[in-house]
Amino acid sequence: MSVSTHGLRVHRGPQMLRAAVELFSSMRFAIALLTVICIASIIGTVLKQHEPINNYINQFGPFWAELFRAAGLDAVYSAWWFMLILLFLVVSTSLCVARNTPRILVDLKTFKEDIRAQSLKAFGQRAETRLGETPEAAANRIGQLLVSGGWKVKLQQREATAGGSRPTGAGWMVAARAGGAHKLGYIAAHSAIVLVCIGGLLDGDLVVRAQTWFNGKSVFTGGGMIADVAPEHRLSASNPTFRGNILVPEGGQGSVAILNQADGVLLQELPFSIELKKFIVDYYSTGMPKLFASEVVLHDRETGEQVPARIEVNHPASYKGVEIYQSSFDDGGSKVKLKAVPMAAAAKPFEVEGIIGGPSTEITNGKDKLTLEYAALRVINVENFADAGAMTSGADVRKVDLRHDIESRLGAANKVNKPKVLRNIGPSIGYKLRDASGQAREYQNYMVPVDTGDGQPVFLLGMREKPEDPFRYLRVPADEQGSMDGFVRMRTALGDPDTRARAIERYIAKATDPKRPEMAEQLRVSATRALALFSGSERAKSDATTVGGWQAIAEFMEVNVPEAERERAGGVLVRILNDVLFEVLNLSREGAGLAALPNDEKSQAYLTQAVLAISDAHFYPAPVAMMMTDFTQVQASVFQVARAPGKSVVYLGCLLLIIGIFAMLYVRERRLWVWLTPDGNATGHATDNATTATMAFSVNRKTIDSDREFEHLKHKLLAMNKTEPETP
């Protein structure tokens, strides 16, 4: 029996109903639905799900972001059309199974022993020989051999004829079949699809959405404290199916999970509360988490029972039908102390304290009024220093750069995967500064200085305009005390006209001969102009946009120096400026009661980095850089809590799918017929103890193995060797 691909044909009722039943029950329709689901799943895998709309706008633009939102592609697996397709697939596949199962079961019980003897000669695999025993004895012997080999056998006695209609005595038909599990594999595989889809519907958002449609629940789109959210946005603890996230800080408790929806969130009440006693995290040398686990106590909200548990990745806890998974970890409200480092001439230093994720702080520095938002504290930051100059962003230990790992191993045959030099560069603070218009920039500053490979430790001050951009870093040198004070003092001294004048006079006294006052005056003019431009107190031209730094020097030379002389003049000006800035540095140290730096290689390395930092600081978009001076870390666990009644259904479906596919691919359905008749002599009369045997073999998928099995059956049942010729 071949499985039909057309649908169930109903002969009564309206034509439209009959056509719909035939369509829904056809295998072609089910395959089409399955193809659409596969395509939608690919989209849901490639496109990040449940992201804020601004993330899609930044990545794809307003048009595509709105299109994705309208089509539900940002939440494929909970989209109404995806659920509808799953429902139709369940109906279609169920009808296919219901239509074909009765015929398959009937076919499994049928031996087809009534087949005509003449029809056996039409089979491709057949054999004929003479046996030295009666037909009845041969039938019993062959039947027993087949039964011992795992075949199911049925014997039939009927009248045998020869030469058309001349009777020759009683003949025996041996009909056997094996491999019936092949057809059962069809039922198992298609039933598995139904079960997996039903499990998906049960564990998906269908039940949750139904409560928003029929039970008066609505999605919450506002903000504030969880305790202040109204009851219409909360689902009861008896909700039969849900999947959400809950963040619990160390020493705290949580009993409400957040269910992300396409247009907001719903709050799911749990029948217990989770108290996080201790969070444990261990790292690889790469800085990636090797183990993170949570030691918790589950408090039953009805009985007050306390159940201790340990939750690890791939080792969830279960209580009252709710599975608790270790999903991730985050900051639980760490306390940080920050010190503002002036980056603009009018800025002043100050100190603030805050809590990560807590209330923001309004700061006023000069004319700027900004809102300081405490975004993230990272205690471990591992960077690759194999190519230190290429470092553009800090590594988040919560993420794995899978794309980088794959690209480092694929591509051209001559690609060399450079060895990594991994180093933990210490804690960092992430924050945002939001202006009066609501625009915010994100900053990430490291707490301790880092040696990037040139021997001069620097503080890394990162900044980016958009979340998808990498951080760009301002490198501020650390002084001999390991602080930024030396840089701040030098920058402050550079902004003081009296200090600049004193530095120029010191430089002239060292660089010129007292007997040549005219040369000293020329040098004074050049040094004064260069230092004023570099400090930002003077501009190269009235409409210049650049204020200070090497860019101001470059603009000045473009305006005042002919192109042919710029290279020579630039070299002279750079040497003069470096020497004068060295005097500024020492004057700033003297003002702080520190000894002057000697003019050696180490001092020059510090000066070079300080000059570059001062030049780049003119482009720093904030008047101050917030440096972390102390912190008290509070860890938090992110748990995924789920009540999934469809999980067992999906597991059963997966088991049936494995069994069904194995049966359809590796089990061959075979049928065998042996027709035994008394052997007749030339006169047409039967000969005692002589039988003519005709054997035919049928298999649903002909392979080399089936040929070998046929040869084996010929030898075993009919005592025919492989080289023995068949009787014509």
Image (cartoon, helix red, strand yellow):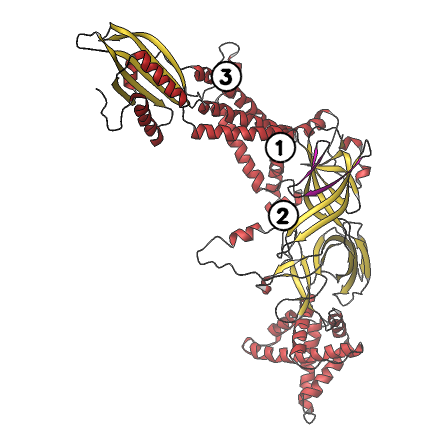
Q: Which residues are magenta?
A: 304-323
Circle 3 residue: 19
SS assignment for the magenta stretch, majority: strand
Q: In the displayed structure, would residue 728 be above or below residue 529?
A: above
C-beta proximity under 8 Å, tags 1 and 3: no
Q: Secondary structure at mark 1?
A: loop
657 horizontally vs 177: left or right: right
Nearer the observer: mark 2 or 1; the answer is 1
Instruction: Write the residue at 64% across / 31% down.
Output: 203
> Which numbered dot is residue 377?
none
| C-alpha span from label 2 to label 1 | 23 Å
Q: Identity of the amino acid at label 3? A: Ala
Q: Is residue 80 magenta?
A: no
Circle 1 residue: 79
Instruction: Write the residue at 68% across / 45% down.
Output: 328
Image coordinates of residue 556 in percent, x first then y, are: 64, 73
Q: Identity of the amino acid at label 1? A: Ala
432 horizontally vs 100: left or right: right
Circle 2 residue: 58
Image coordinates of residue 701 in percent, x first then y, are: 37, 27
Q: Secondary structure at mark 3?
A: helix
Question: Which residue is farthest left?
Answer: 682
* Quarter containing the C terminus: top left
Disc on the earlier residue, 1 or 3: 3
Q: Quadrant of residue 451?
A: bottom right
Q: Secondary structure at mark 2?
A: helix
| C-alpha span from label 1 to label 3 | 28 Å
Q: In the displayed structure, would residue 157 be above or below residue 68?
A: above
